[in-house]
Image (tube, rainbow, N blue to C red):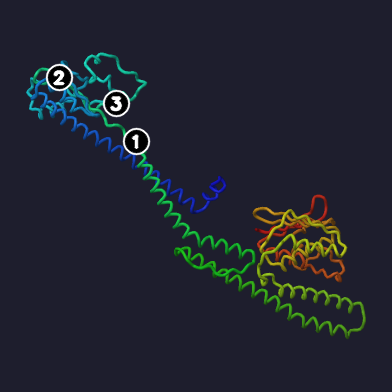
Amino acid sequence: MGIKQLRFWLSSLSGQVIMVALLILVIIQLVGIQIYRMDREETLGLVNSRFTLQRVVSVTHLLNQSPESLHPEILRASRSETLRLRVATQANTPEIRNPHFERIVRSKLEYPESLAIQISAERHPMPTPWFQGPQQRDQPLPDRRHPRRYADIRLQGSIQLEDGRWLDFTSLRDNEIPSWSVKAVLSFVLLAALLAGLMIWLLQRTTRPLKQLAQQAERLGRGDKPEPISESGPREIRDTLTAFNRMQDRLDRFVSDRTRMLAAISHDLRTPITTLQLRCEFLPESEDKQKIQQSLIIMEQMLSATLQFAREDGLSEPMRNLDLPSLLQSLCDDLQDNGHDVSLVAQTAVIYRGRAMALRRALQNLLDNGVKYGGKVEAVLEVTPTQIEIRIRDFGSGIPAEQLEEVFKPFMRLDSARNIEDGSIGLGLAIARTLIHQHGGQLLLSNHPQGGLLAQIFLPR
C-alpha cells in the first residue's frame, strides 16, 4: 500500500476507527504486561525467599546428619540456577543482617543460640562466583563490562554447622523473561487481526449505506434521477436514508411542477398575444402600429423560447456515455462548414456520462455566441483526474467586468439596439448555464487577458 493509499484509508471512517481501536489495544496490552511484570516480581520474590529458606534448612539438616565425605555430593545435588551453596571454614558475614529471616531459620532448625546464623536480604552485584573454589574468594571482582556475571541477590548468608564449619548460601533471581516473547507477540498479532477483521466487517456493513448515499447525492447533483436507496443498516443510518429518499422525491416533484407551470403560463399567454396581433391588423397604417407589431413579435419570440425550454427540459433526457471530444468536434465542424473560423484542441479522448442533447445545446449556444460577437473561436478540452474543462474563447470586444454575471439572467441582452431579427432574445447563456448545472458542473465567464471573452465549463468526472 502506497503513501497516498494509506492516507486515503486513514482519512476514511473505517481507517480512523480501526487505528483508534488498535491503539487502544496496544495501550491495554502494554499496561497489562507492566502490571503482570510487577505482580510477577513481587510473587517471585516471595516464592524465591521461601524456597531458599526451606532448601537451606533441608541442606543444613542433611549436612549435620551425614558424614563429611558425602557433603560434596549433597551440595552438588542441592545447587540450582537460583541457589548457590558451599561449605567453608569461615562465615560469609553480610554487611547488613536481617533478624527476621534469622529467627525463621533458627526456629526451623531448632538451633541453640550457640550456633550462629547470619542472613542478609539485600540486593547487590554478585562478586566472583565463590562456589567455584575457595582459592578464588580473594580474587578481584569480575570485569563490569560483562553484566551477565552480575545479578540481584535475594538472600545470602552463612549458617554454622554442628562440626564448626559454615554453610554459605546465595539465592539469585530467576532469569528475566522478555516482556515481548514470541508467544506474546503472536498472541497480540492474532488478537489484533481478529479485532481488525471484526471491525472491518462491522464498519463496512455500517458505511456501505453511507457510500450509496454519497453516490446517489452525486448523481442527483448531476441532474440524474436515481432509484430510491435501499434503507438498511443501523437505525440512525436508516433514518438518514429515509430522509434523503423523501428529499429526492420532493425535489423531483418541485422541479416537475415548476416546469409544467412555466409551460402552462407560456402556452396560455399565446392566446392574448394572438388576439392583439389580429386586432393590430385592423388598425390604420401608422408608426404606432409598426411599434406595436414589433413589440408583439418580441413577446412571441420570448414565449416561444420559454415554452421550448420548458418542453425540452434536460432532466427528461436519460443519461448515457458520451464521447465528449467527438461531440464538440461535430459542433465545430458544422460552424466551419458555414464559413466560420472555429478550431478545437482536445488532449485526449474521454467518455463522459451525461445528456447528449442538453450538452449539445449548451455548447452550441456558447459557440454561436462566440462566432456571432467575436468572429473567431478557439475551443480547448482538457481532462484531469477529477474534472473535465472546456474553454471557449472568442476574439471580440468582451464584456464589461461588472456585467459578467448579469448576462446569465434570462432575457438579458447587452446590446439593446441589436436587430431582433437575429433571433437573440437573451436566453442563450441562461439556458447554457442551467444545462451545465444539471450535470453538476459550472459555467464561468471572464475576459481573456489578450482580448475577447472566455467561457469555461467544468464538468465533474
Q: Position of residue 214 (x, y in %)?
A: 56, 61
Q: Which quadrant of the view contains residue 452?
A: bottom right
Q: Secondary structure at mark 1?
A: loop
Task: Examine the rendered structure and indicate whether residue 423 appears above or below residue 459.
Answer: below
**Kind of residue sitting beneath label 2:** Trp
Tell me how far mark 1 sits from mark 2, CA to CA. 37 Å
Q: Residue at x 27, y 37 (%)?
A: 40
**Kind of residue sitting beneath label 1:** Pro
Q: Position of residue 106 (x, y in %)?
A: 11, 27
**Kind of residue sitting beneath label 3:** Ala
The C terminus: image quadrant? bottom right
Q: Which quadrant of the view contains residue 343?
A: bottom right
| Residue of label 1 | 178
- Horizontal side of 95 relative to 448 (left or right) equals left
Q: Residue at x 64, y 66 (%)?
A: 223
For the residue carrying disc 1, how many other residues have a C-alpha within 10 Å: few (<14), some (14-19), or many (20+)?
Answer: few
Q: Residue at x 73, y 81 (%)?
A: 268
- Horizontal side of 381 relative to 179 (left or right) equals right
- Horizontal side of 156 relative to 431 (left or right) equals left
In the image, 104 versus 48, the foreground residue is: 48
Q: How many marks?
A: 3
For the residue carrying disc 2, how many other residues have a C-alpha within 10 Å: few (<14), some (14-19), or many (20+)?
Answer: many
Point out the tag, 3 or 1, that comes first from the N-terminus: 3
| Residue of label 2 | 166
Q: Which quadrant of the view contains residue 87?
A: top left
Task: Examine the rendered structure and indicate whether residue 188 appears above or below residue 358.
Answer: above
